[in-house]
């Protein structure tokens, strides 16, 4: 069992973060925020995929103007992403956002940051303190020469202590860089010194397999160590993919389960069917099921049922036939052309979601 770090609980809209709350999955829209309908459509897609907090970019006046409509129609709490323009932080809170993300390092003067904090306190808005390798304070860069783990940690502690000194506790911290090991070190240092909830991720992870692997390693190690109250997988891709990968990471560690988990064996010389094609078809057909179910698709009958005995429902393929099994026990034999349909029927019957 993973023992999660004990953190204080904060509130972002109606979503609890930290404490005994589950690890929260969040993402960020890739639309232009002022294009309200496009933004809301993407938010809806993300929510259907399991996203629980959504961040929107607010770099321009027209984006601030669009916020009331977005907040009013979003199915999940909305966080405004603010950089360099403190006036947008105040106006975003006036527009009703549930949280704001600021990097104090690029806001400017400390008194302005404090004014933002005081306004957030008055309005019950959560703040995420962002500490990134690209927005470190000048004195820390001069001290260390580059954005290393110690510099990121010191920046995060500095601002956390200031927020608490100002009597504001409804905040979380994110310490992010593109270097996986430095990222892990910085978060470990911070986690040892405070009970502030941490939002974790690997910034600028990239796209495709490399981006997913980089994110999975960095986020997975921190989660295994009990660190992380919210998570975003930052990919150069459709943000829905970020949410899917986040749940896959959480599921692989036994932290959260959502939807169908497919277990499939690697290909080998014993396989008599086109296993990748079968697995892909099963995955496509079972998209949209939210109830957590483990489904096995195994390439042969030699050890398949035994190896996948923990699956709720499974298929073991043979030459011209297959066995449907449940919890390691075969329940019926089916012909090859019926294998996928039979498996889907058993899954949907188990889930109670209806017809294929």
Image (spheres, grey):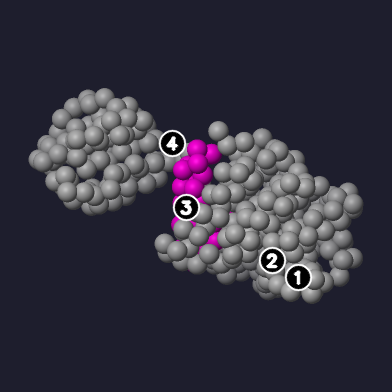
Ranked by sequence position, the earlier of labels 4 and 3 is 3
Up the image or down, 256 lies above or below 326; here it is below
**Mark 2 and mark 1 in contact (Cβ < 8 Å)?**
yes
Pick the residue in front: 71 or 153: 153
* Residue pictured at 57% horizontal, 70% vertical: 32
Instruction: Find residue 306 and report its horizontal and vertical position in percent.
Output: 28, 30
Q: Nearer the viewer, mark 2 or mark 4?
A: 2
Give yes or no for residue 264 being in the magenta stretch.
no
Can you identify the residue that label 3 sits on?
245
Q: Real-space Cα distance between discs 2 and 4?
A: 40 Å
Residue 97 in the image, given as x and y percentages of width and height = 70, 55
- Residue 148, label in figure: 2
The answer to which quarter of the image holds residue 103 is: bottom right
Q: Is residue 178 above or below residue 26?
A: below
Instruction: Give SS at disc 1.
Output: helix
At mark 2, the secondary structure is loop
What is the span of residues highlighted in magenta in the rendered image? 232-256
């Amino acid at each position: 069992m993973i023992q999660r770090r004990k953190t204080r609980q904060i509130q972002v809209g109606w979503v609890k973060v930290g404490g005994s709350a589950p690890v929260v999955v969040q993402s960020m829209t890739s639309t232009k925020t002022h294009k309200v309908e496009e933004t809301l459509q993407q938010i809806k897609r993300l929510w259907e995929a399991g996203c629980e907090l959504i961040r929107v970019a607010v770099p321009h006046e027209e984006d601030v103007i669009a916020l009331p409509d977005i907040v009013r129609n979003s199915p999940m709490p909305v966080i405004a992403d603010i950089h360099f323009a403190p006036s947008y932080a105040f106006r975003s809170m006036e527009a009703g956002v549930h949280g704001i993300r600021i990097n104090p390092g690029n806001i400017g003067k400390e008194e302005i940051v404090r004014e933002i904090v005081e306004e957030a306190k008055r309005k019950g808005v959560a703040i995420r303190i962002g500490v990134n390798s690209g927005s470190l304070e000048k004195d820390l860069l001069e001290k260390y020469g580059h954005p290393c783990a110690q510099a990121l940690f010191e920046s995060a502690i500095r601002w956390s202590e200031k927020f608490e000194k100002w009597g504001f506790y409804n905040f979380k911290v994110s310490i992010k860089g593109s270097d996986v090991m430095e990222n892990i070190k910085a978060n470990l240092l911070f986690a040892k010194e405070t009970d502030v909830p941490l939002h974790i991720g690997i910034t600028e992870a990239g796209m495709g397999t490399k981006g997913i692997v980089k994110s999975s390693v960095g986020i997975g190690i921190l989660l295994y160590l009990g660190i992380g109250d919210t998570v975003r997988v930052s990919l150069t891709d459709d943000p829905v993919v970020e949410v899917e990968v986040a749940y896959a990471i959480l599921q692989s560690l036994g932290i959260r389960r959502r939807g169908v988990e497919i277990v499939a064996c690697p290909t080998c010389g014993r396989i008599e069917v086109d296993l990748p094609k079968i697995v892909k078809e099963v995955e496509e057909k079972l998209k949209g099921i939210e109830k957590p179910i483990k489904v096995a698709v195994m390439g042969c009958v030699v050890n398949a049922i035994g190896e996948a005995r923990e699956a709720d429902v499974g298929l073991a393929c043979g030459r011209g036939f297959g066995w449907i099994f449940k919890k390691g026990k075969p329940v019926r034999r089916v012909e090859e052309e019926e294998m996928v349909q039979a498996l889907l029927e058993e899954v949907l019957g188990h889930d109670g979601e209806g017809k294929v």
